[in-house]
Amino acid sequence: MKEEKEIKILAIESSCDETAAAVIRNGREVLSNVISSQIELHKLYGGVVPEIASRKHIEKVNQVIQAALDEAEMTLDDMDAIGVTYGPGLVGALLVGVAEAKAIAYAKKLPLVGVHHIEGHISANYIEHPDLEPPFICLVVSGGHTHLVRVKDYGTYEILGRTRDDAAGEAFDKVARAIGLGYPGGPKIDKLSKEGNPEAISFPKAHVAEAPLDFSFSGVKSAVLNYINGCEMKGISYNTADIAASFQKAVVDVLVEHSMKAVEMYHTDKFAIAGGVAANSGLRKAMKAACEQKGIQFSYPSPIFCTDNAAMIGVAAYYEYLAGTRHGLDLNAVPNLKLGER
């Protein structure tokens, strides 16, 4: 049997506060994955400052690309295509990656493949789960997105549910700030919640009557802020670990409930999670238990592939490349790019 030609893709990711590059072989094998994080810098401001993020991307992008090539023991001449995130995200950050990818593609006469950032997150599941193939349902939870997605095929998606207001990760960041944990909020609330009682405080779990798979997290965020304000006005002390644990439980319960509802509605036997919040230990534990109870195959990426990285972009770019997707040098950053748009 004739062996398939190896396809090696250099991927670039710079949509928010991390500059990353990776080399991916045949869509599933990570030869290198280099990430330059700006988190320590943005901590000073309590969140991502777009102008600072863009400047840091410019400083770091060539360095991470060279580091990724060195780690893979390859050069640009060994690459078959260049993959890059072109949306959604911070426009200044996206532009740095897109300009870099276009320059390399032009100089080396390589195909250019633009990738949707959320499709990258979903594709991260393919890295460590070689048996995972579409169709399946995926919950994407991050700082800017909360989507229930039906993955019909590689590159073919249907949004089943989405948040009506705050994304889950955004709610985590705001609550973390309110209880004095700072940025980034998700990992800090996850850590603190282990010391608290998740049953201590009953926070609301919002449901959208006309759209049972949609989410709403502004209510639970406001309930936490009101609880803290009420305690402070009455001179009552409160336990931040209990607040963190109870808030996390309220969010996780809704994410799991809606996910399992989607599994039942679409009769799927495969379910995955993706995005920064997919690294949350409470969510992973609860989702794993729910899937085991229903006899469903559950996939999730390692924490390094949950947060923004270039390996996931390279995987998505590989399947786009096989599908014939090619972008010209007029490719531009699209900060509000919708899932499934081309």
Image (tube, grey):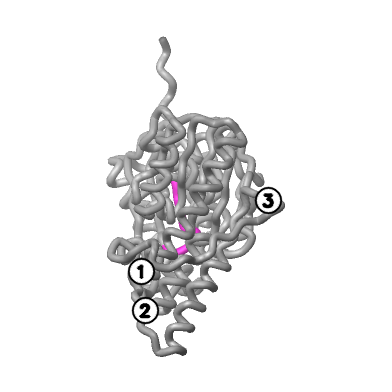
In the figure, is residue 292 to the left or right of 135? left
For disc 2, the marked residue is: 238
In the figure, is residue 16 to the left or right of 147? left
Quarter of the picture holding the C terminus: top right
Mark 3 residue crowding within 10 angstroms, few (<14) / some (14–19) / many (20+): few
Disc assigned to residue 242: 1
**Residue 4 % position (x, y):** 43, 20
**Magenta highlight on residue 18:** no
Q: Residue at x 42, y 36 (%)?
A: 293
As measured in the structure, the alpha-carbon distance from the residue carrying label 2 to the one carrying label 1 is 8 Å
Q: Are marks 2 and 1 in contact (CB under 8 Å)?
A: yes
Q: Amino acid at mark 1?
A: Asp
Which picture quadrant has residue 179?
bottom left
Residue 113, relative to residue 249: is it above or below?
above
In the figure, is residue 214 to the left or right of 238? right
Q: Amino acid at mark 3?
A: Ala
Q: Residue at x 59, y 39 (%)?
A: 150
Q: Residue at x 35, y 50 (%)?
A: 303
Write down the region rendered in magenta: 9-17
Mark 1 residue crowding within 10 angstroms, few (<14) / some (14–19) / many (20+): many
Q: Nearer the viewer, mark 2 or mark 3?
A: 2
As measured in the structure, the alpha-carbon distance from the residue carrying label 3 to the one carrying label 1 is 31 Å
Q: Amino acid at mark 2?
A: Tyr
For disc 3, the marked residue is: 211
Q: Secondary structure at mark 1?
A: helix
**Residue 109 % position (x, y):** 51, 41
Query: Which mark is first along the chain, 1 or 3?
Result: 3
Front-lying residue, 147 or 76? 147
Mark 2 residue crowding within 10 angstroms, few (<14) / some (14–19) / many (20+): few
Q: Are marks 2 and 3 in contact (CB under 8 Å)?
A: no
Q: Residue at x 48, y 49 (%)?
A: 104
